[in-house]
Image: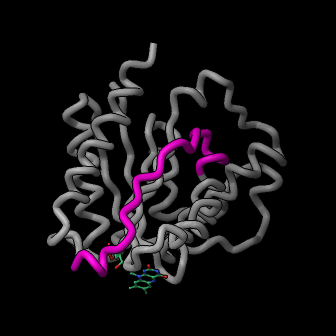
């Protein structure tokens, strides 16, 4: 069964990001996928120390709630990184998670113990789901390379953006039901595509 792991970097319960993320996952469930969501703000974890210990053995010396999260990241088929835009990029929670993925980069390029073949990359999809206050599409530009860094290191083809710009002008997600409908449709369509993959 196609399994989706969604990491929610929004600290706000039932906010814009969580609402469209839930709709996206409902769509994916309707297509037949199994889903799990983890709220990063509910976890206890440290930021990367920059000690570079992972360069030697490919292992992070920090052991906390993110240790298990990374095991789940490496076991899922579709990884959704969901975050509102804070100060032009992802939230601190999401950036903290992404920085902690440095041990995967080390496994690829330092210890050379992590290799993803073409089949793996075809069947592992990275989705960036985001909301912004301002209606300008450029609001997401600084976040794209940040999430790409994690998707690349963890072996996901980053092919999907599910973006809702302009929550402020719409008065928030509750006054913008079309955003919820679109998130549902995109979740269903993306999951379906992977499920139908030969
Ligand atoms: C600290 C902070 C920084 C923000 N920075 C931006 C920004 O740079 N650009 C923008 O368009 N919206 C910005 N916003 C608005 C949020 O991106 C927007 O309201 C989003 O939909 C909130 O999602 P949430 O309900 O999941 O928290 C910011 C909001 C906060 C709280």
Looking at the image, in which quadrant does ligand 1 appear?
Answer: bottom left
Residue bounds of the magenta highlight:
151-171
Is residue 69 or residue 130 the one in the foreground?
130
Rendered residue at 36%/63% (across/down): 164
Rendering coords of residue 170 (x, y %): 24, 75
Q: How is the image coloured?
A: one colour
Rendering coords of residue 132 (x, y %): 40, 73
Number of numbered labels in the structure image = 0
Residue 6 visible to the viewer: yes
Say whether residue 108 is left or right of residue 43.
right
Magenta segment includes 49: no
Rendering coords of residue 158 (x, y %): 56, 44
Magenta segment includes 159: yes
Q: Check the image and report above or below for 14 versus 148.
A: below
Rendered residue at 15%/70% (across/down): 174
Say whether residue 14 is left or right of residue 86.
left
Residue 40 visible to the viewer: no
């Amino acid at each position: 069964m196609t399994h989706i792991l969604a990491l929610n970097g929004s600290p706000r319960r039932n906010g814009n990001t969580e609402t469209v993320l839930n709709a996206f996952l409902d769509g994916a469930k309707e297509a037949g996928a199994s889903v799990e969501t983890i709220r990063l703000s509910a976890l206890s974890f440290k930021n990367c120390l920059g000690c570079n210990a992972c360069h030697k053995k490919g292992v992070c010396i920090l052991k906390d709630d993110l240790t298990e999260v990374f095991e789940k990241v490496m076991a899922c088929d579709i990884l959704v990184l969901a975050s509102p835009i804070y100060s032009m990029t992802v939230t601190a929670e999401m950036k903290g998670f992404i920085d902690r993925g440095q041990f995967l980069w080390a496994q690829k390029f330092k210890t050379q113990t992590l290799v993803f073949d073409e089949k793996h990359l075809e069947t592992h999809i990275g989705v960036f789901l985001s909301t912004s206050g301002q209606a300008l599409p450029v609001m997401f530009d600084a976040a794209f390379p940040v999430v790409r860094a994690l998707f690349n290191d963890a072996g996901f083809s980053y092919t999907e953006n599910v973006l809702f710009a302009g929550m402020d002008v719409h008065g928030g997600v509750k006054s913008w039901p079309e955003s919820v409908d679109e998130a549902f449709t995109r979740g269903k369509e993306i999951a379906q595509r992977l499920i139908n993959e030969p």
